[in-house]
Image: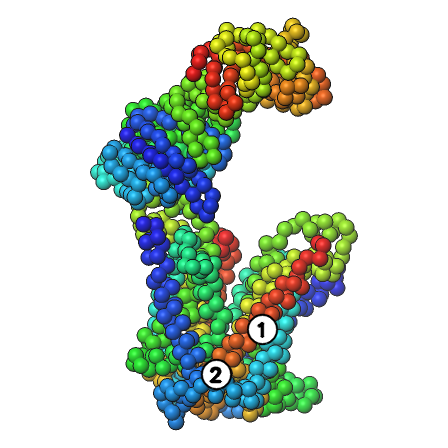
């Protein structure tokens, strides 16, 4: 009797999710063994050909490698900034409603719409950034027509969008910390810097790791920003894996290759995630606290 | 310490300016005439340029412009609300089960099932995009609201489950037992006893679902072609040909405004302490 | 009648109930007495349908309810940790179960009012449980269960989480509330012997999932079936010592020999386990029939002093009236009131109890 009701509660949601996820996932995997494209619509088995081909797909691996600086930098900046703001808010400074709402707004806005706004901001001829730079006597920067500045612009848009998310998570973590260690530290005469590095930071380790991992995951999926701001350009120098796969599979309709890249991407993603998770948790193991 | 005060104030100010800047820029630009945009950056209305409503009328189809953002807005509203409601319903029922019953299928247990749900948010959407495309095509659901709702559920249900399982775990199981002893069947217990108690959690989960659903860009991009475009897709497509920044900015502000209002609502909700009670 | 036959339950290797057999009649209170983990809660949950059984059957009024789902059994349970519906008022709390009883509006309201008055919370009807004290919350839970007038009523150590004074006060009210005019089979679980003695029509002594003895309070107290039961029903614990019977004498160790008291005359020669209650050990007056003991631990509670001592024959527990000035490390001479000795055989089963005669 118990079991019956248990199943009745679980099944609708679980089955729906399984149907929407598992079947497509296997289909994608199957696609990697086909040659489905505009020329060969439909499923034709070609064995592991796509898998050997992908090793030499430079553009794909460039995109993958690009993720490293892109996501790590973005998340690192978000973490430092978000933590700083969280620390300030934690002490009750700037506790006024205006600030709280303001700092919440970016992560609630539609990322892709904001990317369009950032594009207008970084516009090389009529955007305010170059305007201010020129007024300050500096040279205008080719923001969106040159690789490194373009990456910078993308990172800035991402930082703007998601630092509030870090801020919220870290603030919640700070608020749940016990007061005793801080009292002890102040009795011991520790200054603010020392307290931060020896007390606050270690205690915030689990929350920090969780927040960083969540954001790394999301940052690795970047698509919206790239689509709106640079279209992967100039050339293909700001392409992220998702963007390139999108082009391949859904613009050029080369589903077989697109699927192969997707699965490769997924596998690397999972592998890296596991490794990073392990490394971070080992780093945070208390060293005799 | 004065230095500390100064530093903190400076930091807070800088950050606040940084946050405000893109929004203000878009707001100001939305009132510019084409000339005011194309001749270099201008900042202060009335001083450096005369504000106009060209951009704003353009986004509603005025002045011979071909874009009207009202239909995409409607699409966004309908799709988001439907997807959020369905995900909330399905997700909550599933979470209740995961909280109250111990499942076991071979070596798969509750924790594993929960992980399965959460892992759906980890997986990059691109991996499922091809099958989704083909599936919806086969079902004739490409470029339809139903198709979008269906696909959105896959992304929103995990969020609901993740939040609600924790929340249900915070409600003592003894309440369930008590109600059952008092003659209520498990469904009645869920609906009449536990669900009312779960209201705060449901609200939070609902808000998250709506936000994530509304801001979704990828799936609407690849699964619609003009019939049932959602707001984000409509706005970005303005970007494609020429870039009329006055129109774009107006469109951006138009899209962002409801979300800012929402941010006010959420902040109110959070500061009432409701959140700390909801996510126990 | 509630008829429980051979009920066993376990989960993940942990055994909760072992072959429980018990019959209970309506209109009486059956006290489940035992230590924490004895199986009292498990038994009640099994009766309520909340615990899946590995074996055994439960019948009520002739009907087999073993497979009946929880919400179809007519059983009420009052928990140890006062639980009420937090988002309903006191009145709504009591009303909630009554809605399932198909009563008329008038009847329902009457019942709610009656029971609210019975527990003394009529004036608090519109408050939420969070606005009430612990004792009041427990009374709401009680009213909710009693108002149902269910055929089975179970209370799981309901007074345990209340402070001492409140417990005493409620215990009295309790008996009235639960027994007067009640037609329910009532189970009351407790670890406290006083409660068992006061409330029980029958006491069911449980230990580690099994029932050790069922009997009236005086039966269980005066004739504990074995040493285990004796330990459960005595607080402070009964002192158990090994001794011999030789030629009509009670011989303890090498230096204490006294003639067998009247009630033990029928014991043959041999080794036995003897038990003596803590308040039947007295400071010695006549040093010939006494044991020299050294004090390990002194406990003063209420208006009594309890001494934990060691003697040449083993450990003993003594309870003395009044507050005395003893301290650990000191010495005391103790005399065994021989006429209060219990005799158990080598298996621990009761042979002879004082004051009643052979079991």
Closest to the observer, B102 or A156:
B102
**Mark 2 closeness class: few <14, some 14–19, many ≥20 residues within 10 Å:** many
Q: Position of residue A252 (x, y in %)?
A: 43, 90
Label 1 sits on residue:
A272
Residue ID at (39%, 68%): A18
Which residue appears farthest toward the bottom when viewing the image? A39
Q: Is residue B34 left or right of residue B92?
A: right
> What's the residue at 33%, 53% (across, down)?
A5
Question: Is residue A126 at all visible to an observer of this figure?
Answer: no
Is residue C239 shown above or below B206? above
Residue B186 shows in the view: yes
Residue A180's tag is none
Q: Nearer the viewer, residue A10 or A117?
A: A10
Pointer 1 indicates a residue of which chain?
A: A
Does residue B210 appear to the left or right of B184 in the view shown?
right
Q: Check the image and report above or below for A189 versus A165.
A: above
Looking at the rendered structure, the secondary structure element under dot 2 is helix
* SS type, badge 1: helix
Q: Looking at the picture, how far across and down is residue A44, in whole percent?
A: 38, 87
Picture disc at residue A260: 2
Q: Residue at x 43, y 88 (%)?
A: A46
Q: Quadrant of the C terminus of chain A?
A: bottom right
Measured in 3D between alpha carbons, the distance from the residue under mark 2 to the one under mark 1, in whole angstroms, is: 18 Å
Chain for mark 2?
A
Residue C133: % across, % down: 47, 35
Within 10 Å of disc 1 (Cα), the crowding (few <14, some 14-19, many 20+) is: few
Q: Is residue B82 left or right of residue A95?
A: left
Q: Residue at x 47, y 15 (%)?
A: C352
Please determine whether, in this image, residue C93 is positioned above or below residue A267: above
């Amino acid at each position: 009797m118990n079991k019956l009701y248990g199943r009745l509660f679980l099944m609708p949601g679980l089955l729906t999710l399984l149907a929407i996820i598992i079947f497509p996932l296997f289909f994608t995997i199957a696609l990697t063994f086909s040659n489905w494209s505009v020329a060969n619509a439909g499923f034709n088995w070609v064995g592991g050909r796509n898998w050997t081909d992908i090793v030499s797909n430079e553009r794909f691996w460039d995109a993958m490698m690009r993720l490293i600086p892109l996501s790590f930098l973005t998340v690192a900046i978000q973490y430092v900034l978000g933590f700083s703001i969280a620390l300030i808010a934690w002490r009750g400074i700037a506790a006024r409603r205006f600030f709280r709402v303001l700092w919440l707004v970016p992560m609630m806005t539609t990322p892709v719409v904001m990317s369009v706004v950032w594009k207008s901001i970084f516009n090389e001829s009529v955007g305010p950034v170059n305007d201010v730079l020129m007024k300050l006597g500096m040279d205008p920067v080719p923001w969106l027509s040159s690789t490194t500045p373009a990456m910078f612009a993308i990172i800035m848009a991402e930082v703007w969008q998601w630092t509030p998310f870090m801020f919220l998570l870290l603030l919640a973590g700070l608020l749940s910390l016990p007061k005793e260690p801080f009292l002890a530290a102040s009795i011991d005469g520790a200054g603010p810097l020392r307290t931060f590095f020896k007390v606050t930071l270690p205690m915030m380790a689990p929350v920090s790791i969780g927040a960083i991992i969540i954001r790394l995951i999301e940052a690795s999926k970047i698509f919206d920003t790239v689509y709106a701001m640079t279209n992967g350009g100039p050339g293909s120098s700001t392409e992220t894996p998702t963007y390139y796969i999108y082009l391949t599979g859904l613009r050029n309709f080369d589903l077989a290759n697109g699927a192969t890249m997707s699965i490769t991407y997924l596998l690397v993603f999972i592998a890296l995630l596991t490794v990073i998770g392990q490394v971070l948790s080992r780093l945070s193991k208390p060293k005799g606290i | 310490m004065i230095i500390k005060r100064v530093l903190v104030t400076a930091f807070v100010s800088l950050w606040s300016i940084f946050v405000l800047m893109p929004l203000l820029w878009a707001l100001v630009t939305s009132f510019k005439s084409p000339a005011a945009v194309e001749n270099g950056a201008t900042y202060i209305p009335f001083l450096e340029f005369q504000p106009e409503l060209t951009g704003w009328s353009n986004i509603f189809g005025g002045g011979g412009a071909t874009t009207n953002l009202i239909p995409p807005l409607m699409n966004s509203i309908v799709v988001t609300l439907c997807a959020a409601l369905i995900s909330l319903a399905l997700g909550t029922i599933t979470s209740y089960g995961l909280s109250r019953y111990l499942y076991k299928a071979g070596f798969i247990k509750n924790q594993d099932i929960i992980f399965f749900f959460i892992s759906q948010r980890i997986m990059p959407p691109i991996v499922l995009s091809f099958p989704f495309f083909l599936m919806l095509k086969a079902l004739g659901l490409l470029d339809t609201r139903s198709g979008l709702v269906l696909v959105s559920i896959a992304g929103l249900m995990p969020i609901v489950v993740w939040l609600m399982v924790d929340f249900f775990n915070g409600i003592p199981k003894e309440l369930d037992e008590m109600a059952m002893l008092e003659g209520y069947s498990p469904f009645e217990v869920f609906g009449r006893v536990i669900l009312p108690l779960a209201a705060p959690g449901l609200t939070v989960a609902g808000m998250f679902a709506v936000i994530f659903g509304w801001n979704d860009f990828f799936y609407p991009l690849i699964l619609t072609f003009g019939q049932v475009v959602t707001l984000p897709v409509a706005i970005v497509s303005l970007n494609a040909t020429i870039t009329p920044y006055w129109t774009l900015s107006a469109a951006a502000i138009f899209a962002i405004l409801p979300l800012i209002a929402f941010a006010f609502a959420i902040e109110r909700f959070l500061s009432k302490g409701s959140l700390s009670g909801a996510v126990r | 009648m509630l008829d429980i036959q051979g009920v066993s339950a376990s989960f993940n290797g942990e055994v909760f109930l072992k072959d429980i057999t018990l019959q209970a009649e309506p209109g009486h209170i059956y006290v489940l007495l035992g230590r924490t983990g004895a199986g009292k809660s498990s038994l009640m949950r099994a009766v309520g349908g909340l615990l899946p059984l590995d074996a055994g059957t439960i019948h009520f009024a002739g009907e087999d309810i073993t497979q009946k789902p929880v919400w179809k059994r007519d059983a009420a349970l009052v928990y140890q940790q006062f639980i009420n519906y937090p988002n309903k008022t006191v009145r709504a709390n009591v009303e909630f179960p009554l809605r399932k009883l198909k009563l008329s509006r008038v009847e329902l309201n009457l019942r709610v009012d009656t029971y609210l008055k019975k527990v003394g919370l009529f004036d608090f009807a519109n408050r939420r449980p969070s606005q009430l004290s612990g004792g009041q919350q427990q009374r709401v839970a009680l009213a909710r269960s009693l108002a149902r007038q269910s055929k089975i009523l179970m209370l799981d150590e309901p007074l345990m989480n209340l402070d001492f004074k409140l417990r005493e006060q409620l215990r009295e009210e309790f008996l009235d509330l639960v027994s007067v005019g009640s037609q329910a089979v009532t189970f009351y679980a407790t670890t406290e012997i006083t409660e068992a003695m006061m409330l029980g029509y029958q006491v069911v002594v449980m230990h580690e999932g099994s029932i050790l003895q069922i009997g009236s309070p005086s039966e269980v107290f005066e004739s504990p079936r074995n040493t285990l039961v004796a330990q459960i029903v005595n607080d402070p614990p009964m002192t158990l010592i090994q001794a011999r019977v030789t030629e009509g004498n009670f011989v303890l160790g090498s230096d204490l020999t006294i003639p067998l008291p009247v009630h033990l005359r029928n014991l043959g020669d041999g080794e036995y386990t003897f038990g003596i209650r803590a308040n039947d050990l007295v400071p010695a007056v006549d040093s010939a029939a006494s044991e020299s003991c050294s004090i390990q631990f002194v406990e003063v509670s209420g208006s009594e002093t309890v001494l934990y001592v060691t003697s040449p024959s083993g450990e003993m527990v003594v309870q003395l009236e009044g507050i005395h000035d003893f301290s650990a490390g000191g010495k005391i001479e103790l005399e065994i009131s021989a006429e209060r000795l219990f005799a158990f055989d080598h298996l621990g089963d009761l042979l002879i109890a004082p004051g009643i005669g052979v079991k």
